[in-house]
Image: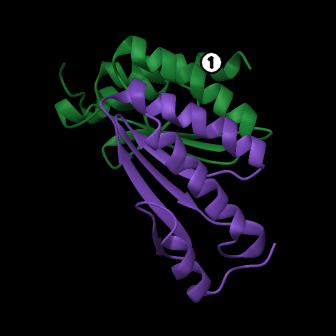
Chain colours: A purple, B green
């Protein structure tokens, strides 16, 4: 899968909510009511990530979740990252 | 809950496996076969953390899991952290 150019990334960022591009990855953060809510969403994301065979770099502290997406094999950002970003947005919006 | 002294922390570290103390927290890392294995263990830890009402600061990248424990309210490490560390060790050893 081909690495996207900066202009392709900028264009695709318009189609996702709350994601930022820096340090060769796209990033977002979410804040939930509590740990249970945060981990419940993580679990839903985990299943979708596994189905897509593309996984987030993520960290969680209590009710906060940080997610970074990049395609390690491609050394940058690919369509895979935006596909997963859209999936994550859909999960969050469904909450 | 009282913050532990450095010597108390050093003593308690002898009773847990693979945890290190630095930057005002205790830390460990694990590596699993794949994402599914890593996230399965995270789920088990999540339930125990919620039961203890004490939660990890953690991050995951594919098969790797980093965990840091500290007691934010106490501004350091307390018995709660070592209780959760022992629980995490028991979950990992059961794998």
In front of the other: B86 or A54: A54
- Position of residue B63 relative to residue A15, above or below, is above
Residue B18 image offset from top left, x and y in percent: 58, 34
In front of the other: B23 or A53: A53
Q: Residue at x 78, y 78 (%)?
A: A2
Q: Residue at x 59, y 19 (%)?
A: B44
Residue A1 image offset from top left, x and y in percent: 81, 72
Q: In which quadrant is the N terminus of chain B drawn? A: top left
The residue that mark 1 highlights is: B91
Q: In which quadrant is the C terminus of chain B drawn? A: top right
The answer to whether residue B11 is seen in the rendering is no
In front of the other: A87 or A72: A87
The answer to whether residue B81 is seen in the rendering is yes
- Position of residue A31 relative to residue B48, above or below, is below
Q: State the SS at label 1.
A: helix
**Count of numbered labels shown in the rendering:** 1
Q: Quadrant of residue A11?
A: bottom right
In the rendered structure, the answer to whether residue B17 lies left or right of residue B77 reads right
Image mark 1: chain: B
In the rendered structure, the answer to whether residue B15 lies left or right of residue A45 reads left
Residue A8 image offset from top left, x and y in percent: 61, 83
In front of the other: B25 or A62: A62
Q: Rate crowding at label 1 as few (under 14), some (14 to 19) or many (20 or more) other CA atoms within 10 Å.
A: some
- Position of residue B23 relative to residue A70, above or below, is above
Q: Quadrant of residue A31?
A: top left
Residue A15 image offset from top left, x and y in percent: 52, 67
């Amino acid at each position: 899968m081909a690495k996207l150019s900066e202009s392709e990334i900028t264009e695709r960022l318009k189609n996702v909510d709350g994601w930022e591009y820096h340090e060769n990855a796209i990033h977002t953060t979410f804040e939930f009511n509590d740990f249970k809510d945060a981990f419940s969403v993580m679990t839903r994301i985990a299943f979708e990530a596994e189905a897509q065979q593309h996984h987030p770099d993520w960290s969680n502290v209590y009710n906060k979740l940080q997610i970074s997406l990049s395609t390690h094999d491609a050394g940058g950002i690919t369509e895979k990252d935006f596909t997963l970003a859209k999936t994550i947005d859909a999960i969050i919006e469904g909450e």
